Image (cartoon, rainbow, N blue to C red):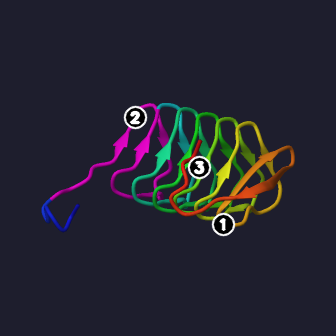
Amino acid sequence: MREVCTDLTFVSAIHPRASIARDVSVGEGTVVMAGATINPSCSIGRFCILNTNSSLDHDSIMEDFSSLAPFVTTGGNCRIGGYSAVSIGVVLIHGIYIGEHSIVDAGSTVVKNIDPFKVAYGTPARAIRSRQPGDKYL
């Protein structure tokens, strides 16, 4: 889009009831919904979504186009790969990596890293199948 309109600026929308630590970086086009919490030293990429009452704990990273659904809770030092979706009510323990283009299904508890291009679910979550670039999320 920038090739067509070089002056186009994307804004980030942050709800006033979101809680964001001072040393957090939030990329353009990102949406932070009501009740979301982003703790110290986190980095949020471009065009991400932190949905209602989601929580990203300290030193975590969300890469571009990744999303946390409502009531997702992460431990500290987690990394959510680009174009990944973490579904409603998922819990990630400390230090988890969710690979790019992966989906973690609702209500899962993630205790081990999820490789890129995987669909994972369960408690504990495990990869159930692979995905291809461009696959629909549902």
Label 3 near label 2: C-beta < 8 Å? no
* Residue 87 image point, x, y percent: 64, 41
Q: Amino acid at mark 1?
A: Pro
Seen in the image, is 125 located left or right of residue 137? right
Q: Residue at left 40%, top 59%?
A: 46
Q: Main secondary structure of the magenta part?
A: loop
Query: What's the mark number on residue 85?
Result: 3
Q: Amino acid at mark 2?
A: His
- From the image, tell me which residue sits under label 1: 116
C-alpha distance separating marks 2 and 3? 21 Å
Query: What's the mark number on residue 125?
Result: none
**Residue 17 falls within the magenta-colored stretch:** yes
Q: Residue at left 59%, top 62%?
A: 132
Q: How many marks?
A: 3
Quarter that holds the C terminus = top right
Seen in the image, is 14 located left or right of residue 116? left
Badge 3 element? strand
Start and end of the magenta stretch? Answer: 8-33
- From the image, tell me which residue sits under label 2: 15
* Residue 113 image point, x, y percent: 76, 63
Label 1 near label 3: C-beta < 8 Å? no
